[in-house]
Amino acid sequence: MNPLEKLSIRLSLTKAEISLISILLGFLVLGGVLKNIRSVEDAATLLKKTETARYRETEVDSLISLATMEQATVKEEMLQEVKTEGDEIADGKKTEHRSSGKKVFTGTIAFNKASSRQLQKIPGIGPVMAERLIAFRSKKGGKVQQFEDFLAVKGIGKKKLESLKKYFTLE
């Protein structure tokens, strides 16, 4: 006697009923396997999202460290300017400021090495534009090769680029 026949006698079921129950049990097992595979895929997706979020936090940390370095640079420049002005006063070479209060910048600045404070001395560049230019320079790897690249900076068009060419050198 076949094991299927023995089972049908014990359960008092026909062979057709046993076959149907076997098929249903097969589908149940298959459903469990598919659900497990989907949960593994969902876990992999969640893992990727977690890694992406971790990298975003790393970007924020690096931006914070860049800002800290920039603040340190600005403090050093301010100390140097105060020291220079103090030396000029001690030497008696301090000149009186003009009554207009505005200084006219003449000369050029090496853009790839300029600080925010130096960039702000150029007419038409305020603190916001100086920060945009420094961010643009760091995005380019610390060195800008062509003046036309400045057109990618928000707030610089062809007209402003022409005026900036007078003051920048791209060493």
Image (tube, helix red, strand yellow):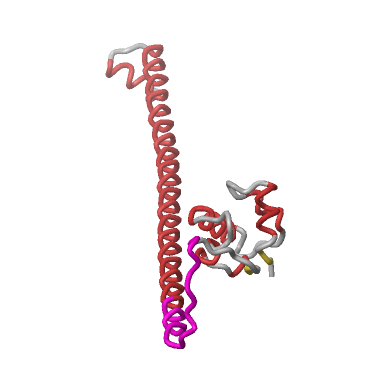
Residue farthest bottom in this picture: 91
Viewer-proximal residue among 30 and 66: 66
Q: Residue at x 58, y 47 (%)?
A: 154
153 left or right, relative to 62: right
Q: Position of residue 86 (x, y in %)?
A: 41, 82
Q: Position of residue 132 (x, y in %)?
A: 54, 54
Note whether 94 is above or below 107 in the view shown.
Answer: below
Viewer-proximal residue among 32 and 87: 87
Note whether 90 is above or below 7 in the view shown.
Answer: below
Note whether 149 is above or below 24 in the view shown.
Answer: below
Viewer-proximal residue among 165 and 67: 165
Residue 92 part of the magenta segment: yes
What range is drawn magenta here? 82-101
Residue farthest front in this picture: 99
Image quadrant assignment for residue 12? top left
Q: Residue at x 58, y 58 (%)?
A: 123
Viewer-proximal residue among 162 and 114: 162
Q: Residue at x 43, y 62 (%)?
A: 67
Q: Position of residue 54 (x, y in %)?
A: 41, 52
Residue 91 part of the magenta segment: yes
158 left or right, relative to 138: right
101 left or right, relative to 152: left
Q: How many marks?
A: 0
Image quadrant assignment for residue 144? bottom right
Quarter holding the C terminus is: bottom right
157 left or right, relative to 53: right
Q: Position of residue 150 (x, y in %)?
A: 65, 53
Quarter holding the N terminus is: top left
Note whether 150 is above or below 19 in the view shown.
Answer: below
